[in-house]
Amino acid sequence: MRKKIPDKLYEIIVYVFYGVLATIISWGSYAVFEKYLHLGIILSNTLSWTLAMVFAFFTNKLRVFKSKSFEPKLVIREFISFAASRGITGAIELVGVPLLAKVGFDKPFFNLVHTFNLEKIGVLLTNGIYSKIAVSVIIVVLNYVFSKLIVFRKVKTPDSDEEQDFQGD
């Protein structure tokens, strides 16, 4: 099966798979923090983002972009650039989720939950959850671009056509 899928498509499929897992971690922990621990939208969002970011670093490094080297200089560069790029998209999320929630983005979805008598599924009425979903779509695309082009980029070695992890200077 694997041999039939081109490498670039396979990379995207694996990225989406681990991205879905990171998203589940983010959304699930957000719901726990906000709805059950009552930490508020901003703190809940910050904590859920942090958990998902740490998970994503390791899965992106090892499984998606196959940066297997643990040479300290490379790992430090990767982690700093990963954290910085996720910081950019994290800032978009940290501002975007509360902003959308404040302007009432979630209200039509809450109305649908009430219309279909789904109130018993408490997570569907979590404050800001639909705003979080909408912002997450944008974040996924940006995170892939940053990871592919900046964080885990590969360079061709001068003596061959093989690619290796970018070490930087």
Image (cartoon, grey):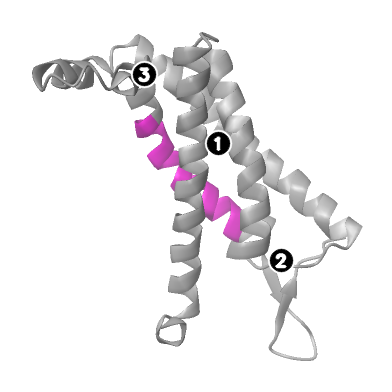
Element marked by disc 3? helix
Can you tell which mark lies on residue 68? none
Element marked by disc 1? helix
Residue identified by numbered label 2: 67
Instruction: Give whichever of discs 2 and 1 has the lower sequence position.
Output: 2
Q: CA distance from mark 1 to mark 3?
A: 16 Å
Image position of 151 (left or right of 98): right
Residue 150 is at least partly visible in this image = no
Coordinates of residue 94 in the picture (x, y in percent): 53, 23
Instruction: Give whichever of discs 1 and 3 has the lower sequence position.
Output: 1
Image position of 122 (left or right of 83): left
> Does the segment drawn in magenta span residue 142?
yes
Can you tell which mark lies on residue 100? 3
The amino acid on which the numbered mark 1 sits, given as a three-letter code, is Thr
In this view of the protein, which residue sits in the foreground, 131 or 148? 131
Please provide the residue range marked out in magenta.
133-148
Which residue: 70% across, 85% down?
A: 162
Position above or below: 85 against 14: above
Residue identified by numbered label 1: 89
Which residue: 53% across, 22% down?
A: 45
Crowd band around label 3 with a 10 angstrom C-alpha radius: few (<14), some (14–19), many (20+):
some
